[in-house]
Image (tube, grey):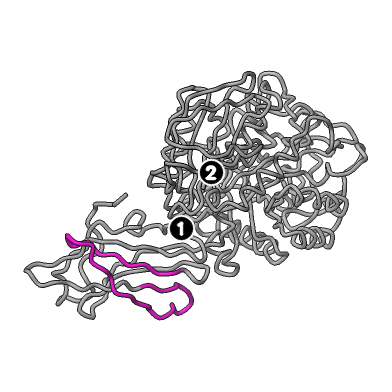
Amino acid sequence: MRDNRRVGTPLASDRAAAYVAECISPQLEAGRHPIKRELGDRVTVAADIFRHGHAAVEPRLLYRLVGAGRSRWRETPMESEGNDRFRASFELDALGTWEFTFSLDGERWATRWPVLCERVRARYGSWYEMFPRSQGTDPTRSATLREAAARLDEIAGMGFDVVYLPPIHPIGHSHRKGPNNSLTAGPGDPGSPYAIGSEAGGHDAIEPGLGTLDDFDHFVAEAESRGMEVALDFALNCSPDHPYVREHPDWFFHRPDGTIQYAENPPKKYEDIYPLNFEGPAREAIAQELLRVLTFWAAHRVRIFRVDNPHTKPMALWERLIAGVRARYPDVIFLSEAFTRPKPMKHLAKLGFSQSYTYFTWRNQKDELRAYAEELALGPSREYFRPNFFVNTPDILPPVLQTGGRAAFLMRLVLAATLAPNYGMYSGFELCEGRAVPGTEEYLDSEKYQFKVWDWDRPGNIKDTITLVNRIRREHPALQRLEGIRFLRADNPQMLLYARYSPGFADVLVVAVNLDPHNTQESPIEIPADELGLNAAGFEVNDLLATPRGLWRGRQHYLKLDHAQPAAILHLR
């Protein structure tokens, strides 16, 4: 999609000011924010470039990596596509912010357009979230990080790329929450990990029940040895016992009587948390401390941070913190947990967040799933907003998983894993855990507030299917990028049908999902093979979740999906 605003003029010198550039792509808000790409990508730049009179123009594309002293400009000629439209491309061979501009007659354009180059993991990955304290066998105490490391073989075996840990810091005692978020905790209740801080330390310390910093380093090394990364939660919450409260009382909001108000995110109340005052007189000191904490964990080989509720903090703070971390660690990825309105959510992405949680968790009907996927993959936000389709979180057990049984878990797995290149699940999903506090999306007996011991092999689990789906994702480039999606005709409103394909149709899949977890659904479907780079006279179809389906011909077909096997991932060639 072109941006038709006139930008990028005049050139750097008066002599060339007669040249005009319009409809420059890709760019975001006239260069105020960078578009996003990944290492090894080629950025294709196009622009309408012309001048008064009849003389032909021969523009060149200039590009460079931005850094200390800024690297030298590289350049390449732009090819004419006719009607004053020119195009050229360049490769991103280093992480960081790049910029491009144009030159004509040896004069360089004054305006520059930025491109943020991140690791491929920013674009594609499978996430597994777990509470390390619940990975043991004793329900009366926390499992240690070394005990939790024993589960890494199984998680890696299921094909996950990222192991995401909720806060692992010391937990406060004051106003500690009890089971099911009750306001009274017993002597053995561990409290919520999101109430950070005690006499054992704050955001740069480890909860004693989990072990030590050396134990954390061991966990990270064990994950890396299995081909996985560790993502750490960055939650800016402080319990009343956090060292900050004692050492920096001016960092917090105070009532007229001098007491500190606990945190709220209506309708939720967090009596065990004090909110920092990010816009008060101490804002500079707070920002410096947060940058220190982030770089502290980056020095311990954490290269992915999931940021808790970033939309409730000043936007400018995140732009500063993310830039500050990347100045030292350009490979760090930030995931925004901003379940908020669309525009603030997208603005956080513009400011530098690599990925974002989405509304997928609550999209269930055929039309809304299609509309949302098309908005993300084909709309203008595709240039900067990378969605991460989590199927559940510790805070969100959506109604379809509460009532749909095993079929619902299988259906949502396939949808998330094939509609978005980044997807994730919170542990218990593989066990089809669907018990909720009545009338809410909160898990019953949530491990946010108590120690849990799980039977990871309990009957009815879907670990084998998760393993298979993650293997399909790794083997098929069609599922590793957001673009390359087309929804296809399926007459049944309970059947969603879409093609996923890599550039040039080198890899083509057609995914069919039964959206009804209680009944078998069947439907006439249409596969426009000739429009997907295939021979409509005959193409081989292999169901990657089940058995080969043989040779298909033409556009019109018929598909039946049992609710016990509610999806098909068809490899077409």
Closest to the observer: 323 or 97? 97
Give whichever of 344, 426 is nearer the camera.
Answer: 426
Q: Residue 452, can we see it?
A: no
541 vs 91: above or below: above
Callout 2: SS:
strand
In the picture, residue 84 is in which quadrant?
A: bottom left
Q: In front here: 71 or 281?
A: 71
Q: Which mark is residue 36?
A: 1
Asked if one can make out residue 225 in the rendered structure from this viewpoint, the answer is yes
Where residue 262 appears, as percent x and y from the top left, is 66, 37
Which residue type does callout 2 highlight? Answer: Glu
The reply, left or right, for residue 88 in relation to residue 136 is left
* Residue at screen point 55% across, 41% down: 541
Residue 214 vs 200, above or below: the answer is below
Q: In the rendered view, tell whether residue 260 sits above or below residue 104.
A: above
> Residue 312: within the magenta?
no
Q: Nearer the viewer, residue 171 or 218?
A: 218
Instruction: Give me the residue at 71% from left, 53% from top.
Output: 244
- Mark 2 crowd level (few <14, some 14–19, many ≥20, 10 Å Cα): some
Query: Label 2 belongs to which residue?
Result: 540
Residue appearing at x 31%, y 69% in the figure: 101
Amino acid tagged 1: Lys
> x, y percentage for residue 201?
79, 54
Q: Which residues are magenta?
A: 63-91
Residue at 56% across, 40% down? 570
